[in-house]
Image: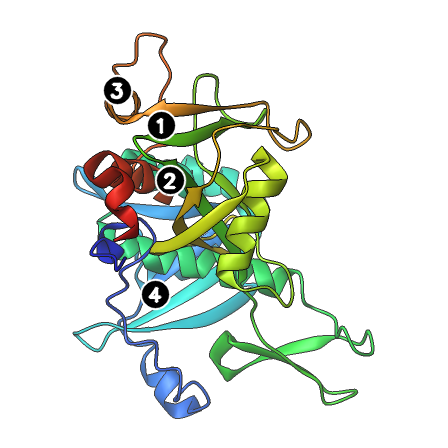
Amino acid sequence: MSSSRETQLTYAGSMLDRLSEQRGDTALVESLRANARNFVLAGESFVLAKRGEGFDAGLTNDEAASTGDALETALLGKDGKSRGHFAHAISPSRIDGIKARGDFIVVDLRSIALQGLVPPEDMSALATSKALLFWHERHRFCSNCGKPTRPAQAGWRRDCAACGGQHFPRTDPCVIMLAVRGEHCLLARQTRFPPGMWSALAGFVEPGESIEEAVRREALEEAGIPAGRVAYFASQPWPFPMSIMIGCFVEAKTEKLKIDEVELEAARWVTKDECSLLLTGKHPARFFAPPPLAIAHHLIKGFVERCAEVFD
């Protein structure tokens, strides 16, 4: 099943030219710093500039400089106006001073998405910034020899001068799957979920494993369901901290459940009509689905629209 939802998913649909083949061109990178848009991350939160009644995630060079010295900087790409877009990490110790100024707010990425504080086209740049800067923070030393590394390729590589090792940003693939059996789908809860929220099963892809194999393994491990067909739905960058969610439907061969009580608090089969109530917030028990920023919401919505036809 091919997806038509890619650009509708939060954190996806970047409009930037990432310039991946030109990151080593120092002159080009420096030229892009003029009139750049800068996405400034302090700890887990971004600095947004107040613009009239709204907010802007892309700070000017002067605004970015006024928030504090950049601990790390990375080129995100350029837009259709040839403006450079950069990610900057500053010390979390700067947050209180920035909040006191009045011309900025400091907000975590989930809240930015949930509240719709910035245009959708900036969400991908924020997600890239968060994942990339998180990687830099945790890879300051070489995994080969333990010596310090330094940024290279406009922030898309770290090099070790001691052993010559080159280290690249990583993305952790995670499958999120909605098990379907006829007119029912399987929803589950984890203890960390907000009270009343039900979602799809999910888990990380292991080394040497295909996406389809990971989907079937997770369905069996978490819910005790032998699985058959797997249909790809869509994927979503998920910068918490640096994953990509690979959304799939999976055919359940039985309705009998044997849940992993370490992973799940509960799991149950849900009808299409009940899923509609979960999506709209009208469930009589005040149960609800994940918000539209999460691919799980769109998996459930896809089931409501197509049911077993998701495998066609």
Q: How many marks?
A: 4
Instruction: Tell me the SS state at disc 3.
Output: helix
Q: How is the image coloured?
A: rainbow
Q: Between 256 and 136, which is closer to the camera in this rendering?
A: 256
Give the distance between the C-alpha atoms of the residues marked 4 and 2, in whole angstroms. 37 Å
Which residue is denoted by mark 1 in the rendering? 289
Q: Which of pointers 4 and 3 indicates the residue nearer the eye?
A: 3
Horizontal side, residue 114 vs residue 198: left or right: left
**Residue drawn 42% across and 46% down?**
250
Mark 4 residue crowding within 10 angstroms, few (<14) / some (14–19) / many (20+) = some
Is mark 4 in CB contact (under 8 Å) with mark 3? no
Instruction: Tell me the SS state at disc 1.
Output: loop
Is tag 4's residue or tag 2's residue first in the polypeptide sequence? 4
Which residue is denoted by mark 4 in the rendering? 61
Query: Label 4 amino acid?
Result: Asn
Q: Position of residue 289 (x, y in %)?
A: 35, 27
Is 274 rendered above or below residue 134? above
Q: Which of pointers 4 and 2 indicates the residue nearer the eye?
A: 2
Q: Position of residue 39 (x, y in %)?
A: 38, 58
Mark 1 residue crowding within 10 angstroms, few (<14) / some (14–19) / many (20+) = many
- On residue 296, the disc is 2
- On residue 277, the disc is 3
Is mark 1 in CB contact (under 8 Å) with mark 2? yes
Is tag 3's residue or tag 2's residue first in the polypeptide sequence? 3
Whether residue 108 is visible: no
Query: Label 3 amino acid?
Result: Leu
Instruction: Tell me the SS state at disc 2.
Output: helix
Give the distance between the C-alpha atoms of the residues marked 3 and 2, in whole angstroms. 15 Å
Q: Position of residue 145 (x, y in %)?
A: 83, 78
- On residue 94, the disc is none
